[in-house]
Image: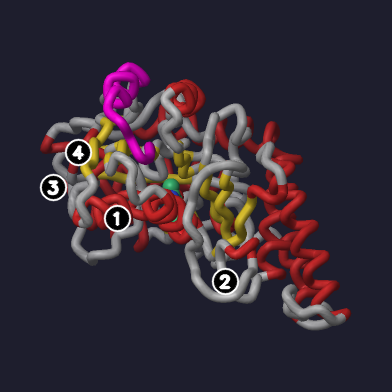
Amino acid sequence: MEKIYFDYASTTPVDPEVVQAMMPYFFEKFGNAASPHAFGREAQKALEEARETLAGLIGAAPEEIVFCSGATEANNHAILGVARANPEGSKHILVASIEHHAVLEPVKYLEKAGYRVTSLKVDATGQVSPDDVKKAVREPTTLMCVMHASNEVGTIQPVAVIGAIAQEHKIPFLVDAVQTVGHVPVNVRALAADLLSLSAHKFYGPKGIGALYIRKGTKVARFLLGGDQERGRRGSTQNVAGAVGMAKALELCVQRMTTEAQEQTRLRDRLLVEIPQRIQGVKVNGHLRDRLPNNAHFSFQGLETESLLMGLDMAGVAASMGSACSSGAMEPSHVLKAMGLAEDFIYGSLRLTIGRWTTEAQIAYLLEQLPGIVRGLRI
Ligand SMILES: *Cc1c(COP(=O)(O)O)cnc(C)c1O
């Protein structure tokens, strides 16, 4: 049986062109970028070129980019780094209720350490309201975190408007842009972000490499203490092949963005329209217009996500509930709860995310299989 992948939001395959670009840095050009000899200088040059490319593609300056292991690290670096750099600050954090755990957990850690945390609620489509932000920023605030787009329901936030409010109140603003970088235009200045996190494996680059954008002048403490790599912000031998791959991956995404977004929107809309046509008791979640091109998210009344995913898996289809399930138990998602989903819809959620290699035939196969699977589970 052919295995079909509908889980591009959790990770993507690496584009073959990206692998090709990385290859030389595993053998002939394997040097440590911190070494002063020829091998090191060669690696250093590739690393700085990758930094320049990546920075340019998100509207940043090269010296504002810190390479790291991925977006979990980037978010931890940003949140804990801002807190540590402002020990005498207000000790108040504003955070969207629908953030990824890579933001929520470091914020929770600070809450335990004495910070006050205000959770920004969302409406039924999963959007934060700029009016709520305006009210919340009346209090002195150390840091505000609002993600660019939800990894679960695909809703894109009015980040530029929220960022302008943060800027006006001089509150450092962190944008987790993992789901948007490479998929929709991202420009750090247009979003008024002071800090922005991204991860290569969400846009056809390798796992284990990401970046944190730190706007010049933003006070952030050093994160990994060790050598003086990454301008002293992150000690550790730099992942040159990873950085080269990430820059190449984003370059390809930006070149193809308009066409890919159009094609994915078309396929995604088939799912959003045809699944509720073919199956009773289905709700489409997330914003219908302000939405990632590759995300379709549903709730099935009276179903359990776990059995739905198992049924799909048996039909060769890999899908997800919307967030990586780390605990093993399928608890209702904090995102759907924050959106106020009704009790009989909240347990049967399904996220279908498509990407570069999704075909019309795969969409047709899914549309053909799903009604039978749901019927079987509802008996
Ligand atoms: C995947 C993801 C992360 C975590 O990224 P890693 O690089 O895997 O650590 C953080 N935020 C969002 C929105 C994500 O989708």
The number of numbered badges drawn on the structure is 4
Secondary structure, mark 3, is loop
Residue type highlighted by circle 1? Glu
**Which label number is shown at residue 379?**
3
Q: Residues within 10 Å of mark 2 (few under 14, many from 20)?
A: some
Q: Which mark is in front, 2 or 4?
A: 2
Q: Is residue 40 left or right of residue 317?
A: right
As helix, strand or loop, the secondary structure at mark 4 comes to: helix
Q: Report, in whole angstroms, how far the alpha carbon at label 3 lies from the one at label 2.
A: 57 Å
Q: Judge whether 165 appears above or below 89 on screen.
A: above
The mark that comes first in sequence, 1 or 4, is 1
Tag 1 residue: 105
Q: Tag 3 or tag 4, which sits nearer the N-term?
A: 4
Question: Local crowd at mark 1 within 10 Å, few (<14), some, or many (≥20)?
Answer: some
Lateral position of residue 297 relative to residue 31, left or right: left
Q: Which residue is mark 2?
A: 235
